[in-house]
Image (cartoon, rainbow, N blue to C red):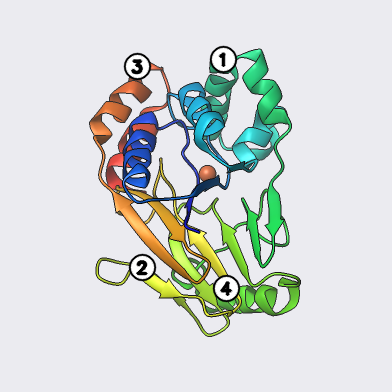
Amino acid sequence: MKIAIVSDIHGNLEALEAVMADIEDRNIDKIYCLGDIVGYGPKPAECLRIAMDKFDLILQGNHEWGLFNDVEMYFNSIAVEGIYHARKELSDSEMDFVSELKPGKLIAPQLYVHGSVRNPLMDYVRDVAESGHEGYMKLIETIREDFKGFDTCFVGHNHKPFLGTEYGVIHPHEGMDTFQLAGEKAYVCVGSVGQPRDKDSRSCYAIFDGKQVTYVRIKYDITITSNQILQAGLPEFLATRIMQGI
Ligand SMILES: [Fe+2]
């Protein structure tokens, strides 16, 4: 069985449609989403409708959580703007649907979460490039101590694709995008469809066939989303960051 695992769509309809077209071309059996369909982007409701129609698993991300909580306490001002926008765009029934989502699901031997094993909603799994040796030691510690009842933990939230194991961290790139998991305990960070932050502006998602993970990058027309962000009155930074992949 081939599963497409997408995450952090963030209201970027143009990116999601490009990814969905690619998924349809690849004989995929199921689509799982690791949260953050809304937030930051201009088209949260349109993205949610595609998710409700086509996805087999939808997890709650911290931006979905923000729809129902005191966002000023937990988010920066730019993220707050995106959540206010999503609150306006979603219908009552869509809000009801989102309110029922959970941030994690165990489908042994895989665990799917938005954040991390320790905190499925809010915590970040950081890579070595971002958090240095200390971060890597934390990654090893959590893999050794917290991976119980599953081998692989798929996460979104950090908007960067990488594979973290007890033996090292791998960043996928052109020509090196497929990795055998071979029963090894691993964090698989699937990257972001709608707001990649690894300096590659193309959408990112992963395909998992039970044994190996393949990362896929998809080009889409970013100017359309950027213009939609400005038209929606969202902060200008949101329109420029997706061009730069930051
Ligand atoms: Fe996110």
Q: Which of pointers 4 and 2 lies earlier in the amino acid sequence?
A: 2
What kind of element bears circle 2? Answer: loop
Disc 2 to disc 1, C-alpha distance: 37 Å
Circle 2 residues within 10 Å: few <14, some 14–19, many ≥20: some
Question: Residue 82, how many percent across, how many down?
Answer: 51, 28
Q: Is residue 227 left or right of residue 58?
A: left
Q: Report if the CB atoms under discs 4 and 3 are less than 8 Å apart.
A: no
Q: Which mark is residue 186?
A: 4
Q: Is residue 120 left or right of residue 227?
A: right
Q: Which of pointers 2 and 1 lies earlier in the amino acid sequence?
A: 1
Residue at 43% in and 57% down: 206
Q: Which of pointers 2 and 3 lies earlier in the amino acid sequence?
A: 2
Q: Which of pointers 4 and 3 lies earlier in the amino acid sequence?
A: 4
Q: Amino acid at mark 3?
A: Gln
Question: Residue 89, how many percent across, how many down?
Answer: 53, 16
Q: Report if the CB atoms under discs 4 and 2 are less than 8 Å apart.
A: no
Residue at 51% in and 25% down: 49
What residue is pinned by disc 3?
231
Q: Which of pointers 3 and 1 lies earlier in the amino acid sequence?
A: 1
Q: Which mark is residue 172?
A: 2
Disc 4 to disc 2, C-alpha distance: 14 Å
